[in-house]
Every structure is written in C-alpha cells, then in structure tokens.
C-alpha cells in the first residue's frame, strides 16, 4: 500500500464548540424545526447522500453504494459541522435488474423519477433557507441522468448546486496507490477490492467472503467478436479505440455481478478510502462555503403534482 502525505481537513475548533453543542445530530431528520432555524442562523449548507439499492454479487449487500454515500457524508458532517439529510437509497439501476423472477433484489427508479425526487428534496430544502445543496453520490449510473435536474435547480433558484462522486471506477483519483489489484483486475469495479473493503470497514457481518469470486467482464453476446469489453463502462473497444457505446445490462457482460478481484479487500483499505474521500470533499465544501450565493427564488410552489 503506497503511503500518502497527510492532508487532514480542519475539524471543528474550540470556537465552533458552542455551535456543535446546539445539535444532538447532524442528520436533519433527527432534529426539530427549532434546531433547523438555529442552524440556518449560521450556515446554509446541507449534504444529500444518494446512491442505490442494487445487486452487488453474491458476497456484498444490496446497500453497498448507499453505504459509501452515507459513511462519507457522516464523516464530512462530523468534521466540519454541516447538516445532512437521510439518504436517497434508490437510484438509476435498470441494468442491474437481471431476469424476471431471479430474485436479484435491485430497486431501480426511472430516470424521470430520480430527477423528480432530487428536485423535490432540493426545492424543499431551498424553500426552508438552505442555499448550498451538495449531493454526495455513491452510485455510478446516477451520473448518467442527473445533469438536467442539477441545471434546473440552479437556473430556477440561484442556489449553489453540486454533485460529488467519491468512488473509483476507471479514475483512481485520490485513491491512487491504495488498491493492490493491477489494472487488468479492475480495482475499482463492481463488488471488487474497493467496494468489498469499504463494506468490511462499515460492517464486516454484512460481507460473505466465502461467496466472493474473482470475475472479469466480457463482451456481450449480441456484439461481434471485433468489439471488446473488460469493465463495467457502457463503451466498448473497436480497432483499439473506444468510440462505440451501447445500452447493456449487467448480466450481459458479467453473470454473477462481480467485476474484478475482491480477494485482496481489507477493512483497513476501506477505512483509508473513507478517510481520503471524506477529508477531500470536506475541504472542498469549506471552500464552497466562502462563495457568495444569491438565491432569487425560494418558495416551492409546484409541490403537489
């Protein structure tokens, strides 16, 4: 495991202690409106964790992506003293449904449903006085559909809207050097080393390592042999280039839900991943709290249909 220099996030200082003592929880749902009013006298930032409930192979819980979003969000809130909502626990996961009656358990939202859910949650928060809405997303496929609602919220209200993606697929980012799997074992992919490590750090009782297997993605049968695929992205390789994209279901390129090698996962790696992600995002949110935000429309009028 490659060591990285420490870049800790500024935690709450002694001067912030009175602010911390006012709140028994950073979860909006644990508080009363008296607490919300008190918080908004000082801060207008709120985090919205969101992800999915979808199959993650035979050894990980369906809640895996939401675990990522919730744990990182909780850590950010504790580190810098900002509120968060309960998680949006279902996302855009049509490719994870598998066959009718197979019992995979995935709960998917249609794109329109997810966008409406995000809009209504954010508009409610803006209505109450929050001006900086930070979605903390733990599920890759949500990124395919969210741009319209993020723009809608910004254009219609003037609020600061951000969508944060603290996970690793092809892009290692701040986790470079942490995973041991080589690139051909897709270290950041579905139910592989990273997600298994994070679930072990969260709750090892939910991880069934005796069921884990080392699996690779393959080209779907509906494509000719000239097209190649070895990970979970929707694009494929043709003549050495990746210009072709296809709508594919997960079972068409991996049968058991695992893409990669989960065998090198450890709770220690998961804890370190959570630390790096949360401290990085917390530092970014500290910077965003310095920005002047002019919300021109707060009232959530269209709230019935």
Image (spheres, helix red, strand yellow):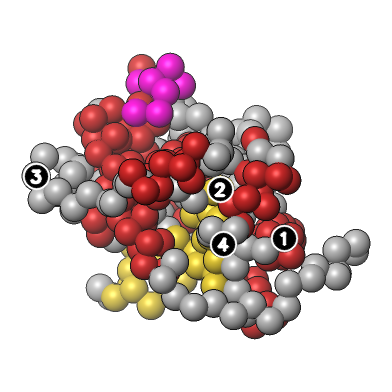
Q: Earlier in the sequence, mark 4 or mark 1?
A: 4
Q: Spatial distance from mark 3 to mark 2, Cα to Cα?
A: 31 Å
Q: Are marks 2 and 4 in contact (CB under 8 Å)?
A: no
Which mark, residue 44?
4
301 left or right, relative to 247: right
Residue 246 counted in the magenta span: no
Report crowding for label 2: few under 14, some 14 to 19, many 20 or more residues within 10 A (C-alpha). Answer: many
Quadrant in which the N terminus appears? top left
Q: Earlier in the sequence, mark 4 or mark 3?
A: 3
> Label 1, on which residue?
128
> Label 3, on which residue?
3
Numbered disc in front, either 4 or 3: 4
Task: Tell me where residue 71 appears, x and y as whole percent.
Answer: 44, 39
Quick one: SS at disc 4? loop
Q: Earlier in the sequence, mark 1 or mark 3?
A: 3
Q: Which residues are magenta?
A: 201-209
Q: Spatial distance from mark 1 to mark 3, Cα to Cα?
A: 44 Å
Task: Tell me where residue 73 appears, x and y as whole percent.
Answer: 46, 46
Residue visible at 45% across and 29% down?
Answer: 60
């Amino acid at each position: 495991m490659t060591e990285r220099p420490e870049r800790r996030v500024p935690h709450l200082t002694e001067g912030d202690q009175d602010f911390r003592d006012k709140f028994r929880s950073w979860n909006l749902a644990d508080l009363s409106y008296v607490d919300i009013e008190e918080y908004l006298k000082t801060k207008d930032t709120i985090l919205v964790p969101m992800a999915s409930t979808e199959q993650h192979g035979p050894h990980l819980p369906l809640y895996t992506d939401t675990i990522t979003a919730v744990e990182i969000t909780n850590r950010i809130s504790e580190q810098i003293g900002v509120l968060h909502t309960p998680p949006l626990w279902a996302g855009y996961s049509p490719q994870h449904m598998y066959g009718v009656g197979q019992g995979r358990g995935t709960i998917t939202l249609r794109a329109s449903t997810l966008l409406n859910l995000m809009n209504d949650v954010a508009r409610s928060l803006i209505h109450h006085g929050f001006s900086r809405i930070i979605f903390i997303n733990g599920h890759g496929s949500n990124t395919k559909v969210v741009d319209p609602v993020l723009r809608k919220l910004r254009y219609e209200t003037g609020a600061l809207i951000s969508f944060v993606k603290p996970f690793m697929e092809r892009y290692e980012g701040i986790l470079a050097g942490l995973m041991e799997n080589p690139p051909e074992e897709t270290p950041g992919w579905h139910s592989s080393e990273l997600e298994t490590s994070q679930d072990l750090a969260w709750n090892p009782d939910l991880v069934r390592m005796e069921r884990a297997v080392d699996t690779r993605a393959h080209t779907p049968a509906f494509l000719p042999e000239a097209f190649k695929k070895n990970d979970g992205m929707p694009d494929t390789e043709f003549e050495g280039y990746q210009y072709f994209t296809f709508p594919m279901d997960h079972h068409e390129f991996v049968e058991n839900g695992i893409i990669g090698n989960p065998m090198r996962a450890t709770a220690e790696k998961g804890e370190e991943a959570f630390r790096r992600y949360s401290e990085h995002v917390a530092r970014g949110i500290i910077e965003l709290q310095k920005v002047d935000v002019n919300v021109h429309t707060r009232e959530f009028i269209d709230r019935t249909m």
